[in-house]
Amino acid sequence: MNILIVLAHPERASFNGGLVDVAIETLCGAGHKVEIDDLYGEGFDPVERASWYGERVDEGYFATLTEQRAHYDAGLLPADVQREIARLDWADLVIFQFPLWWHAQPAILKGWFDRVLIYGGLYSGRMRYDHGYFRGRKAVCSVTAASPEQAFMPFGRAGNMVEWLWPIHSSLYYVGYEVLAPQVSYGVQGGGISYQDEGKFRAQLEVMKNRWASRLIDLDNECPIPFTGWDDWDEAGVLRQSHPMRWRL
């Protein structure tokens, strides 16, 4: 299996970087091919702007989706975007490794979605959800959070982690990926925030690394998060009255 790891952390020696190293060792040891996409390390520019598009459809007004589609069709996308799309085309599984910052992924990863998931090329009006470009491929988010797990439970002070990760999971499904349940490493303290003494903290980091390694071995056999699809919706895009999820308690 071809596996792409998209790393969105500014410090390669961080715990996020350590989880990438665990994944490389585990997956390569199992016979998979692994490629690392270090967004900070490669200097990926996450800001979408008109200057990326040299052969503008409309010089007077920058319509992002129009320019994305036209430049994709003409093979004139920026070189870094073409490189990222080629990596995604190669990968059977994509692992997104990132810390939770302000209840979302870091800006560099959000911008990666803005620039790389090109309209007209990787999604369109009908080419999305379970008819998406990447249907048959899988994606999983490996996320670190500073607060303890209890804080991210439904009634915890930080709010439900399921809700914080919903936007990125929904975006991945939007372009067709089968999205696996996230791997969340809680209590990764830093920046003066501490929930336990240093010795226990270091031991806990090793536990989380081992837990990730154990899961990676059988990751390809996991069932994805159950999203609804085109056949489940009516003409307005609303879940049909006859769908079983309408009647779940």
Image: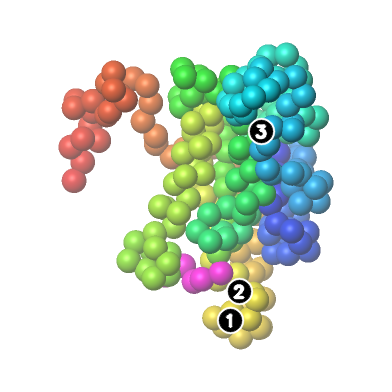
Residue at the front extreme of this rendering: 60
Q: Position of residue 230 (x, y in %)?
A: 37, 21
Q: Quadrant of residue 200?
A: bottom right
- Could you tell me the amino acid type at mark 1? Ser
Q: Position of residue 220 (x, y in %)?
A: 58, 37
Magenta-colored segment: predominant secondary structure? loop
Q: Label for residue 194?
A: 1
Q: Residue at x 55, y 64 (%)?
A: 145
SS assignment at label 3: helix
Quadrant where the image shows the N terminus = top right
- Could you tell me the amino acid type at mark 3? Val
Magenta-colored span: 146-150
Q: Label for residue 189?
A: 2
Asked whether 54 or 3 is in front, the reply is 54
- Give neighbour class at mark 3: few <14, some 14-19, many 20+ (Cα, 10 Å): many
- Could you tell me the amino acid type at mark 2? Gln
